[in-house]
Each structure stands twice: as C-alpha cells, then as structure tokens.
Image (spheres, rainbow, N blue to C red):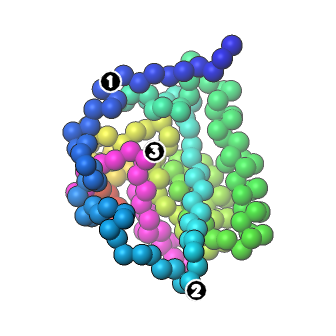
Amino acid sequence: MGPEIMSLGDEYLKYTKRRYGMDHDRYQWSILQKRKPVTWPGGAKVALWVVPALEFFPLDQSAKPFKAPGGMVTPYPDLRHYTLRDYGNRVGVFRVFEVLDGLGIKASVAVNSKVAERYPFLIHEIGRRGWEIIAHGVDMGRLHYGGMDEAEEAAPYRYRGRRSPSRGGRSRGCGAWNESRHSRSRWDRACRR
C-alpha cells in the first residue's frame, strides 16, 4: 500500500494578501538582484544560522480552521505517528546537541510552549549552552489564523520575557506558529508582551 495522500481544498490556497512582493507590511519588499551585496565578517562567503525546532504534536489535533497538513493522520489516538514525532524530543534532540556542541555551533531553537511545559529539562539544556529560544506557537496542532481571538493568539508568547534560570537572560524571539502568518498589529502586541 502506498503512502496516504492528503489533498487540500481550493480554499486552502485562497489568501486575500497574495500579490507580487511580500504579503505583509512589516518591511518593504526589494528584488534580490537590486540589493547591495551582503558582506560577512572576515570576508566569509556563507553565513549559517542553525534553527532546530522542538515541536509538540498533540494526539487530539484540532481541525480549526482545518487540520494542519503534516499532523496526525489516523483516527485518535494516533500512537504510531505521535511516537514518531515525539522521538525528536526524547532522543533526537540529544544527538543534535552532541553534534553542534562538537562543532562549536550555537543555535536558535524554535520551541512550542507545550514543549517548554512538558520538557523543562530541554529548556534548561538549551539555556545551559547559551543558545537562543524562539517562541514557536503552542503546539503543531494549532494553526495561527485570522479568526483567533487576541488571548488565544498571544498564548504561546506567555513565556517570552521571563528570566531563564540557566542563562540569566530573557527570551527575545518570536516565530510564526507552524509557519502560518498573522496581522501585524496583533503580532506586534503578542511579541512585545
């Protein structure tokens, strides 16, 4: 039997701000070929930003506004797909820590707030390394969409700005939930709390 294919309806591709250039007004769009050349310290030809994602996939994913592509696919409880995804938080992340530590590379880690609640040891390990934490939504079952109320939209950023005991600093970054987009004013308010 081949892989299960999930089709998306036409409404999934309808987006009112689809146009040439950026689909937001956070910064002005510019075509790459017309930009000034980028120069990196020491004349380096390449810059590398390592952003591992620590994500929690709930067994009971919501279908609001629709079921997130890439989420649980079989009826509840989808233990086969849940354990596959949770492997990264239980085992895989420690392999990533080891490789990056060995190479002397610091990372910025995109973390769901559910991961921070469920696995505080992982948050401690990130902080112990002096790595940055980027708020990355509540969990991978909740899409960020225009129909959310403001409290629900701000929920994943409640850890933002709290002092980290292992680092002595405060978290500063905000990342989009599941790479979904949002209105600027609500995003700014949520990120600056």
In this orientation, which residue lies closer to the viewer: 35 or 163?
Answer: 35
Q: Regarding mark 2 in the picture, which secondary structure is present there?
A: helix
User: Which residue lies under the disc numbered 3?
Assistant: 178
Question: Would residue 100 be found to the left or right of residue 185 on screen?
Answer: right
Q: Regarding mark 3 in the picture, which secondary structure is present there?
A: helix
- Residue type at mark 2? Gly
User: Which residue lies under the disc numbered 2?
Assistant: 42
| Residue shown at 73% from the left, 49% from the top | 92
- Residue type at mark 3? Asn
- Residue type at mark 1? Asp
Q: Nearer the viewer, mark 2 or mark 1?
A: 2
Secondary structure mostly seen in magenta is loop
User: Which residue lies under the disc numbered 1?
Assistant: 10
- Report whether residue 188 is seen: no
3 and 1 marks in contact (CB < 8 Å): no
181 drawn magenta? yes
Q: At which x and y percent is residue 144?
A: 36, 42
Question: Would residue 138 be found to the left or right of residue 105 on screen?
Answer: left
Badge 2 local density, few (<14 within 10 Å), some, or many (20+)?
A: few
Magenta residues, as a range?
157-186
Q: Nearer the viewer, mark 3 or mark 1?
A: 1
